[in-house]
Image (cartoon, rainbow, N blue to C red):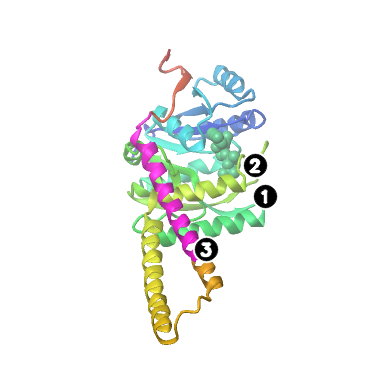
Amino acid sequence: MNTSKKTISIVVPAYNEEEGLREFHRRTSAVLDGMPMTGEIVYVNDGSTDSTWEVMKDIHTEDSRTVIVDLSRNYGKEVALTAGLDYAQGDLVVPIDADLQDPPELIPDLVNKWREGYNVVYARRISRDGETWVKKITARAFYRLMQGIGGKVNIPSNVGDFRLIDRKALNALKQLREQHRFMKGLFALIGFRQVALDYHRDPRFAGRTKWNYWKLWNFSLEGVTSFTIAPLKISTYVGLLTAVFAFIYGLHIFTKALLFGDPVPGFPSLMVMIALLGGIQLTVLGIIGEYLGRVFNETKNRPLYFVQDIISDTEKKSLE
Ligand code: UDP
Ligand code: MG
């Protein structure tokens, strides 16, 4: 197969990565130099508050293979990555983090694997150096849960956004314009021939991760609610079970009152029942609310992002 005419795009979302971006570019461009195909690196500045955009402009003056995109504000990694994927021109596209946690040196291996006839080659972490055990355990629990309730869409565990996707898969992915973008899920949803490649995940090169547990919790919620309505179904059964229980308990109280009269005790059990039912109802309402909120967000059908600036040598685009 002649693959030397294929082009590759490396897509890098970056938010406040001024410290590590040059080192990232040095390593990634070195990888690109050593590959038998031409390529570009698409940097997306996700509304950084530090000098990331200036660093990107410097990098662009030094290396014309780069395309730099400046988003109008911080949109979050998922949207920044989507923007990068939209502007990528290559036949093969590799989303990668700017913090060097995904080793760019792995890209040629991803390409080799792709040559075997796959559409998507995802990099699977076999170690999580530099991450706390709490994060490791919560990550594992999350993947377990997703595997259990994800249904037909099998979201592989220990896989980030670092992967290689070919045009065919990318075109499919680009059609998924939902606001709530759980990328791992979307990558899995499109299907095609997918295969894993194992690698060691390094600690961040510089700066700090923007994740905290509250964000991780919300991320998991996003994953669950955008891929399954299982919580809604579970709510139905919890409701049904409670109703059956209430009916039986009601019969019990009724016969007891018939047989022994009703001397009005039972305040504690009354309070327990009220609290229990109130709790269940509010929880179920909350679950419905989570879905309703997402329906609300999707119906507005807003564009996913706005672009402040694009600098590219191949295609002079200016967006006013
Ligand atoms: N990122 C982004 N927008 C954000 C947060 C992060 O574009 O709002 C980028 C960040 O610069 C990095 C990648 O997404 O290139 C992964 O972020 P991070 O390292 O914080 O996440 P983790 O590796 O802990 O999953
Ligand atoms: Mg990281």
Residue located beneath label 1 in the image: 130
Name the residue nearer the viewer: 81 or 210: 210
- Identify which amino acid the numbered label 1 is placed on: Gly
In the rendered structure, which segment of residues is drawn in magenta? 274-302
Q: CA distance from mark 1 to mark 3?
A: 44 Å
> Can you tell me whether the CB of the residue at mark 2 lies under 8 Å from the nearest atom of ligand 2?
yes
Left or right: 67, with 240 as reference point? right
Q: Is residue 284 magenta?
A: yes
Residue 300 seen anywhere in this rendered image of the structure: yes
Image quarter where the C terminus lies is top left
- Choose mark 2 or mark 3, whichever is in front: 3
Cβ atoms under marks 2 and 1 closer than 8 Å = yes
Element type where label 1 sits in the image: loop
- Residue 276 horizontal/vertical position (percent): 50, 65
Q: Earlier in the sequence, mark 2 or mark 3?
A: 2
- Identify which amino acid the numbered label 2 is placed on: Arg
Q: CA distance from mark 2 to mark 1?
A: 8 Å
Q: Main secondary structure of the magenta part?
A: helix
Q: CA distance from mark 2 to mark 3?
A: 47 Å
- Residue 27 horizontal/vertical position (percent): 60, 34
